[in-house]
């Protein structure tokens, strides 16, 4: 555990007395793909929301890339390099693919609004570098044919990929993927999981993802954390988790 | 009609700006400028300029200001007229008290003063959303009407609380005649449309639309939501402020705070809805509708000689009812506003144009 990018310690979260996360601790190594699995309501999405500041934990603390915090503002999380996709489509529906991806670069913008509007000073270099970076990610995720398409008119699977592109373009150190394959057929899932592993290998991005399809998780992930009712019931390599009796009882057992 | 053309017809809000204005930019812009600055001043009568064209352009400009806030940034304002009144009173006082300042500088300063007020009344947008946000801008509406009627300093101690422009001149040209006022209004509006175009196509415009479509996602990817919202209120009020100055001195000639009452705010709101949200030119169609429809209804009443059989008050009310019904019908049939209707008409013509030459891909 020498090089953890993300370290959660004793994190709890409750909504009006209902415990969503119960004293949760685990580490995510730099460069790995870590999968969070667990039944509906196990607290997986809540956990991602705590990590990037949409929710505030009631107890515990988080160390990300050497920075320790108990609560964090979503903007600060973005600035630290935590990128995120959403379980339910959260794209900017009336904008095109390229505009969505460009918007993902917001935290890298340095020009002030007058420079932006009147195309002065830092805006020129910013427009150039934003466009280059957006095109590079769009090509990487093979979205080129749809670059000028309004995202709300794209099929669901492609929208999920645009969501990934929007998070990825800002060059995050940690990428949180909330059910990137939900609602997809087997082919689309295989395609998406290929893209996730490409992102991890070729761009070196550390990934934490939520996924229900255990088969895909076991292939894709280096590290699996199993949640049940907000508690951690398993934590290890896919093989260790598969053979963990608690996990089988809590989760895997119910699937078969 | 082929399937492809039906798909192409599906209106997608917020993306019109790509197709409309920039289709064949130079040609369209040149035609527009020639019509605005050569043809109209030569052809139009004083009546047309003063009673129809000038108010249409000025209300369209106010609509454009509100559209930047509502259509692009997805925020709410029920107090557009309040910011117009600030622009009008600021222009009056700057011209009166600092006579060295040339008119363009005065208009920009008046816009900036309105922008400052816009930021102040936009502050609640950092904490509340939607319907409730309307209340704070409604507050601006009542506050400024009260301010400008209760403190005579703003109208230079005038007993009637009215303001009239000390002089409308630029580089020695007197602009008080109808053509002069029209040219002033048209030139200012052309520059502000250009500014709006630059804003919408900058990072600022993109981030406004991102916040409008999905504010949680916008925050998570690092967009400075609070700052962008306040900027939207500032820029929107800047446009409305200048529109207010033009309304008072380019159209009315003499105005008081009640020229900018809640009715006017709702008119600007309707202009945006009728013209189409998130468009740059829609507001001008909306304004033409608002200005022309009552005139048209007047003409119809005169032509059918209803005046003889019914009393004036009932007729005026009937006109309002008809006007309201037209607005409701229009918004039901065309929720994306007149600009989407017009665009569909144009693309229909273009399709027929190209259909003979190439099959649709």
Image (cartoon, coloured by chain):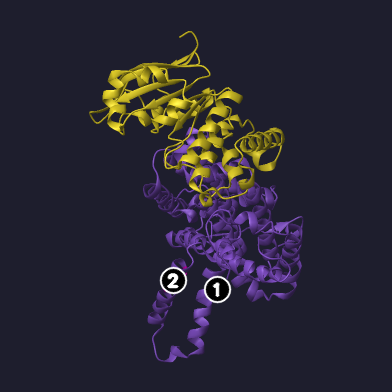
Chain colours: A yellow, B purple
**Vertical position of residue B21 compared to residue A114: above or below:** below
> What is the magenta range?
B324-330
Closer to us: A55 or B185: A55
Residue A51 shows in the view: yes
The chain ID associated with circle 1 is B
Residue B45 in percent (x, y) is at 68, 76
Between disc 2 and disc 1, whose residue precedes? 1
Q: Secondary structure at mark 2?
A: helix
Residue A143 in percent (x, y) is at 61, 42
Structural distance between the alpha carbons of marks 2 and 1: 17 Å
Q: Which residue is the site of mark 2?
A: B329
Q: Nearer the viewer, mark 2 or mark 1?
A: 2
Q: Residue furthest top?
A: A2
Is-magenta flag for residue B130?
A: no
Is-magenta flag for residue B328?
A: yes
Q: How many marks?
A: 2
Residue B326 in percent (x, y) is at 45, 73
The residue at 41%/22% (across/down) is A224
Res B204 label: none
Name the quarter where the C terminus of chain B is drawn: bottom right
The chain ID associated with circle 2 is B
Q: Residue furthest left?
A: A17
Closer to us: B126 or B152: B126
Residue B117 shows in the view: no
Closer to us: B160 or B275: B275
Q: Which residue is the site of mark 1?
A: B292
Q: Residues within 10 Å of mark 1 (few under 14, many from 20)?
A: some
**Vertical position of residue B118 compared to residue B312: above or below:** above
Residue A151 in percent (x, y) is at 54, 48
The residue at 62%/62% (across/down) is B250
Q: Secondary structure at mark 1?
A: helix
Left or right: residue A238 versus residue B55 is left
């Amino acid at each position: 555990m020498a090089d953890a990018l993300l370290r959660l310690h004793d994190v709890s979260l409750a909504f009006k007395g209902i415990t969503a996360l119960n004293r949760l601790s685990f580490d995510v190594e730099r460069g790995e793909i870590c999968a969070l699995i667990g039944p509906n309501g196990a607290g997986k999405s809540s956990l991602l929301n705590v990590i990037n500041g949409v929710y505030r934990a009631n107890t515990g603390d988080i160390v990300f890339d050497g920075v320790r915090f108990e609560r964090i503002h979503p903007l600060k999380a973005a600035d630290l390099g935590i990128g995120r996709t959403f379980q339910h489509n959260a794209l900017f529906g009336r904008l095109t693919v390229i505009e969505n991806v460009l918007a993902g670069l917001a935290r890298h913008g340095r020009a002030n609004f007058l420079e932006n509007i009147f195309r002065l000073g830092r805006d020129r270099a910013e427009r150039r570098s934003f466009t280059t970076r957006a095109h590079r990610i769009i090509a990487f995720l093979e979205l080129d044919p749809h670059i000028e398409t309004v995202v709300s008119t794209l099929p669901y699977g492609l929208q999920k990929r645009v969501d990934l592109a929007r998070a990825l373009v800002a060059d995050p150190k940690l990428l949180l993927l909330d059910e990137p394959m939900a609602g997809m057929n087997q082919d689309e899932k295989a395609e998406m999981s290929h893209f996730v592993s490409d992102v991890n290998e070729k761009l070196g991005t550390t990934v934490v993802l939520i996924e229900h399809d255990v088969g895909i998780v076991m292939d894709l992930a280096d590290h699996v954390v199993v949640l049940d009712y907000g508690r951690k019931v398993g934590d290890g390599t896919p093989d260790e988790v598969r053979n963990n009796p608690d996990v089988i009882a809590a989760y895997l057992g119910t699937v078969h | 009609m082929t399937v492809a053309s039906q798909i192409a017809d599906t209106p997608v809000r917020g993306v019109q700006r790509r197709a409309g204005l920039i289709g064949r930019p130079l040609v369209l812009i040149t035609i527009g400028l020639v019509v605005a600055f050569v043809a109209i001043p030569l052809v139009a009568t004083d009546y047309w300029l003063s009673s129809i064209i000038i108010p249409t352009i000025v209300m369209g400009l106010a609509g454009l200001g509100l559209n930047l806030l509502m259509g692009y940034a997805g925020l709410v304002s029920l107090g557009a007229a309040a910011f117009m009144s600030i622009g009008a009173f600021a222009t009056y006082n700057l011209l009166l008290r600092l006579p060295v300042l040339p008119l363009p500088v005065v208009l920009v300063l008046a816009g900036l003063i309105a922008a400052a007020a816009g930021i102040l009344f936009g502050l609640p947008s950092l904490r509340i959303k939607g319907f409730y946000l309307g209340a704070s801008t409604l507050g601006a509406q009542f506050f400024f009407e009260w301010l400008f009627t209760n403190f005579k300093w703003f109208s230079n101690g005038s007993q009637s609380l009215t303001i009239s422009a000390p002089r409308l001149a630029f580089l020695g040209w007197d602009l008080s005649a109808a053509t002069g006022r029209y040219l002033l209004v048209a030139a200012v509006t052309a520059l502000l449309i250009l500014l709006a175009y630059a804003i919408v196509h900058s990072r600022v415009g993109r981030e406004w639309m991102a916040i409008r479509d999905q504010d949680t996602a916008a925050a998570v990817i690092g967009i400075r939501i609070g700052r962008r919202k306040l900027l939207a209120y500032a820029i929107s009020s800047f446009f409305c402020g200048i529109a207010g100055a033009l309304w008072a001195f380019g159209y009315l000639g003499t105005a008081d705070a009640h020229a900018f009452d809640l009715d006017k705010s709702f008119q600007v709101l309707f202009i945006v809805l009728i013209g189409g949200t998130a468009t740059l030119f829609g507001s001008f169609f909306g304004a033409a509708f608002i200005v022309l429809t009552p005139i048209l209804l007047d003409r119809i009443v005169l032509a059918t000689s209803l005046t003889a059989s019914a009393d004036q008050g009932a007729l005026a009310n009937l006109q309002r009812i008809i006007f309201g019904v037209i607005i409701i019908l229009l918004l039901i049939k065309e929720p994306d506003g007149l600009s989407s209707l017009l665009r569909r008409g144009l693309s229909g013509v273009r399709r027929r144009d190209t259909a003979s030459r190439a099959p649709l891909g």
